[in-house]
Image (cartoon, grey):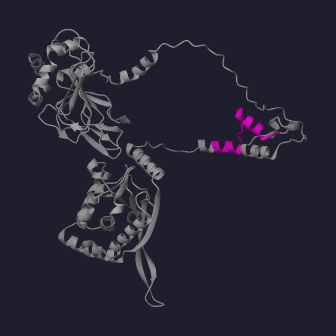
Amino acid sequence: MAYASHLLNHSRKLRNASNLVHHDPALLVRWFSSDAQTSINRKSDLWKMRSQGYITSTRNTVSGTVPNFTKRNLSVATMKMDSIGGSLFNGGISRGSHVQRRRGYASAADLPPHQEIGMPSLSPTMTEGNIARWLKKEGDKVSPGEVLCEVETDKATVEMECMEEGYLAKIIRGDGAKEIKVGEVIAVTVEEEGDIAKFKDYQPSASEPATAAPKEKSAAPPPKKQAVEEPTREPEPKVSKPSAPPPSGDRIFASPLARKLAEEKNVPLSSIKGTGPEGLIVKGDIDDYLASGAKEVSAPSRAKVATDAALDYTDVPISQIRKITASRLLLSKQTIPHYYLTVDTCVDKLMSLRTKLNSLQEASGGARISVNDLVIKAAALALRKVPQCNSSWTDDYIRQYHNVNINVAVQTDHGLFVPVIRDADKKGLSAIGEEVKQLAKKAKENSLKPQDYEGGTFTVSNLGGPFGVKQFCAIINPPQAGILAVGSAEKRVVPGSGPEEFKFASFMAVTLSCDHRVIDGAIGAEWLKAFKGYIENPESMLL
């Protein structure tokens, strides 16, 4: 036990390990017993201690007798945390953080205790991220809860907080670093300020064994001597070489197919020697001529190349958000069987109700209600009425959600965002309107948090009000099964009650994109019928 006490007193982090000692002191005694030391001296394969959700393991072996801890000869012990945040030695575990860390108590280069901070997983779909900027610089003291840097994920730019107290010794990936895999080391922190200078030229060593291992593995087994067989030579392909042009006036014999192919490829028949009967040029001669690398650029082709070279253009870098959005939308169109249903809804009563509600809002000092707010409310109530559309597809089952969370498409300079209005069916119009405004502002400032856009079950995209688009078909936002595309409202002439009577009315076209694996045509039509009922009789939304 004295051996364990020596180690616990050695590290400032381990001095506070009251929970660990209280949990299983006997385990520590066994681990630091003479038997354990003997197995260490024999270079046993691995130490492992598992307790309360953490794992420690050795990376190197320790030889000799009980080491002097002041010289830090203990081998490196790594502690990997995936989705558990907070200090394990500070009396509690805080959940929700996905920062990956590895702690080293020493290293082969006699480095002091340090902690490698990996690229965190800040969203369920994140596989890599970019460093937008560091808010701390090398040498700064960091405390739990302080923001280290801003990470650009596949959804938004998120602040990464520090989990433990210490000093930022080395920044491995600086401002603007792109395509950093989740778990890749981006920085190193130390416990003591005096240890910062020792990490000036530090490079993470985790990648070195990974690259060297395949080489060693391939070089380990000696090559077996086998009888070397002389490779059989394949017959050389027959290539029609350009021949001298025939005298003027001589007729060139070629098959119709060969003439057509020569015209398409701009190949002069006079440059080809035919291999057919009596020198007839056949299709194979044209193919061989093209395969031989003969130039076939005609005057129009050269003119086109010259025109392309003269074009003036700018290559715009692709942000991480746009890259992920492109891949997800491509995946959606390639893997989801889309079909589309469109209806025209009369919005005269909706506009009248909106005018009355805005008068009440202005009198009470509230924000104005938009048509989009009413559309979101109607869509949420229709999903509650037809819950089959509030679902998603998996390979084994269809998951039907009990919460109605509506994503709202917002276009910004940084890309397309879809913040979520949670439980939209249970919220009032003023609450929906205020939440949409706040989320849209955060999206334009590129400051959305994961909780602001994750967990949606249905999406609404409106290009009618802001842009005047009459009607369009939207791409489903996976893993959802539906998205509503809202067009602009326009006045139309409609027949009246009499034979020669007519009247004017405003109609808005909406298109529902459905995943046919989840929503059958009749179910999609039923949902549109419910949605249209709420739009054309908006008072029913208030019941």
- Name which residue lies at 32% across and 72% down: 534
Residue 7, relative to residue 269: is it above or below?
above
Say which of 304 and 101 sits in front. 101
Residue 427: name its quadrant.
bottom left
Residue 246 is one of the magenta-drawn residues: no
Q: Residue furthest top?
A: 64
Residue 310: name its quadrant.
top right
- Name which residue lies at 86% across and 37% down: 277
Please provide percent x and percent y for residue 448.
Answer: 28, 49
State how many labels appear: 0
Residue 288 is one of the magenta-drawn residues: yes
Assign the C terminus to one quadrant of the image. bottom left
**Bounds of the magenta span?**
281-305
Say which of 444 and 293 sits in front. 293
Please provide percent x and percent y for residue 328.
Answer: 42, 48
Assign the N terminus to one quadrant of the image. top left
Please provide percent x and percent y for residue 281.
Answer: 82, 39
Please provide percent x and percent y for residue 93.
Answer: 16, 37
Q: Is residue 265 visible?
A: yes
Most common secondary structure along the magenta stretch: helix
Q: Is residue 155 left or right of residue 238?
A: left
Residue 374: name its quadrant.
bottom left
Residue 541, relative to residue 409: is it above or below?
below
Q: Is residue 469 visible?
A: no
Q: Residue furthest right?
A: 249
Say which of 77 and 511 sits in front. 77
Residue 219, relative to residue 413: is it above or below?
above
